Image (cartoon, rainbow, N blue to C red):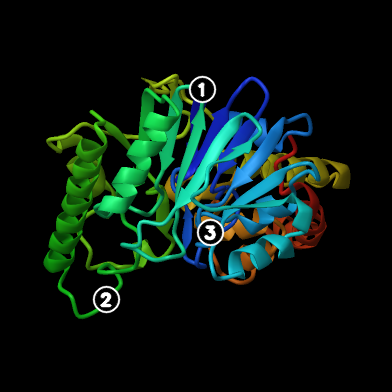
Amino acid sequence: MKISHVNHSSILCETENDLLLTDPWLVSNAFQGWSQFPSPNINEVKKIISKDNNLSFVLLSHAHDDHVDDIFLSKLKDNVKVIIPKTNNLGLKKRVSNTGIKEENIIIIDNNKVKVGDFYISAISNGTLSDEDFIFLISNKNNLVIHANDNWHLYNYQTIEYIKSFIKNNSLSNIILLSQIGIADSFPLFYERIKPKDKKKIIENKIKKMCTAFKNNCIELGIDEGYAYANQSRFSKLNNLKEINFNPYKIKDEIIQSFEFKIIQLMPSDKIINGKFIKNHSPQESLLEHRLNNLENQFKNYSIKKNLQILPVKFKSMAENRQTANEIILYAEDNIWNEILSGLINLETIITGGNGYINKPLNYNMKNEYLLLSKWAYINQNQAKNDLNINL
């Protein structure tokens, strides 16, 4: 079995016949405040979004927004099956159905092992976080992926024994544990009465606690190393916290790297093939960059047809802020771009609504560009609802 990390908690499990994607979070925002950071690489996305893809299954561990991309689900082909855990709450199933997935294409799995294509899958609840967040066991031949998602706490006795039995009964030798180690909620960053130095200390202590739990779970399961994921998100309003003089994401990375037990941080396009980790070292275009480049090219072609003399117009993430010469750049946070690129809103939110910044030559009157952008924004919005500005 070949495993490719897409981003956050999304991995691709690939066999000769089937392609299974877990917890997709590609184009939507989460909780109205998170965007993907980093964005997945376009080469991985092509495998699951292109017209000739062989995606067979999409697995959803729980109903959090960063594990269920409603827009992505709404674009799935009719033959793709969606796997969800069995719970007493019908909310996740209803959410999946609301994206257009037919009921007969929804597979509900509990802790009883089920054969799904080339995979054997089981869903277990550890009970330390909630009864809605499941650990999935995904096996093929002698490979086992323990897809733990947000279940980073110490596993209870029943969970450990169940996984050990699953390994023994299925003669599995390549055991891969993937679990969250990262900044997963607004505490303490967005709690006003906590001092910045105390916020930093709280984050450090929590990351160390997560690493320790990870180590102990690995030891209990007889695993020599594990993989950290489900931590590639960014708060859109983090830049507004002017009193914060530290980077919480950098703190997370530094603690993982220096921890006493070997924890490998998965990044987009890293792979694990038959238990062997292969680090991605080749620079690749991200999905967000790809979509923004498509947006630029479409506007350029539109302006050429109008035969107007205008400056080049670029669309950039706020993280790419730079000085301009003879061009106009529209900047916005990634969560704003996600909504523009998916057709939920359009460029008027930046050029009129102020949800971003415009960089232009100081004494240049951009009236023509403004009028053209205003008109084209609605044309693109209608098209984006269909192709998401991906155009593979």
Tell me the crowding category of disc 1: few under 14, some 14 to 19, or many 20 or more residues within 10 angstroms, Cα based.
some
Tell me the crowding category of disc 3: few under 14, some 14 to 19, or many 20 or more residues within 10 angstroms, Cα based.
many
Q: Given this view, does label 3 or label 2 mark the residue nearer the observer?
A: 2
- Residue occupied by mark 3: 335
Residue 168 is situated, as x and y percent measured from the top left of the image, at 37, 30
Q: Are marks 2 and 1 in contact (CB under 8 Å)?
A: no
Residue 97 is situated, as x and y percent measured from the top left of the image, at 72, 62
- Residue occupied by mark 2: 191
Q: Toward the viewer: 323 or 262?
A: 262
In the picture, the disc for residue 230 is none
In the figure, 290 relative to 35: above or below? above
Q: Residue at x 16, y 60 (%)?
A: 200
Q: Given this view, does label 1 or label 3 mark the residue nearer the observer?
A: 1
Residue 55 is situated, as x and y percent measured from the top left of the image, at 69, 35
- Label 3 secondary element: helix
Q: Quadrant of residue 322?
A: top left
Is residue 216 in sight in this rendering? yes
Residue type highlighted by circle 3 = Asn
Q: Residue at x 70, y 38 (%)?
A: 49
Q: Are marks 3 and 2 in contact (CB under 8 Å)?
A: no
Residue type highlighted by circle 2 = Tyr
The numbered mark, 3 or 2, whose residue comes first in the sequence reads: 2
CA distance for labels 3 and 2:
22 Å
The numbered mark, 2 or 1, whose residue comes first in the sequence reads: 1
Q: Quadrant of residue 275?
A: top left
Tell me the crowding category of disc 2: few under 14, some 14 to 19, or many 20 or more residues within 10 angstroms, Cα based.
few
- Label 1 secondary element: loop
Residue type highlighted by circle 1 = Lys
Residue 214 is situated, as x and y percent measured from the top left of the image, at 24, 44
- Residue occupied by mark 1: 141
Q: Residue at x 70, y 41 (%)?
A: 390
Q: Toward the viewer: 253 or 97?
A: 97
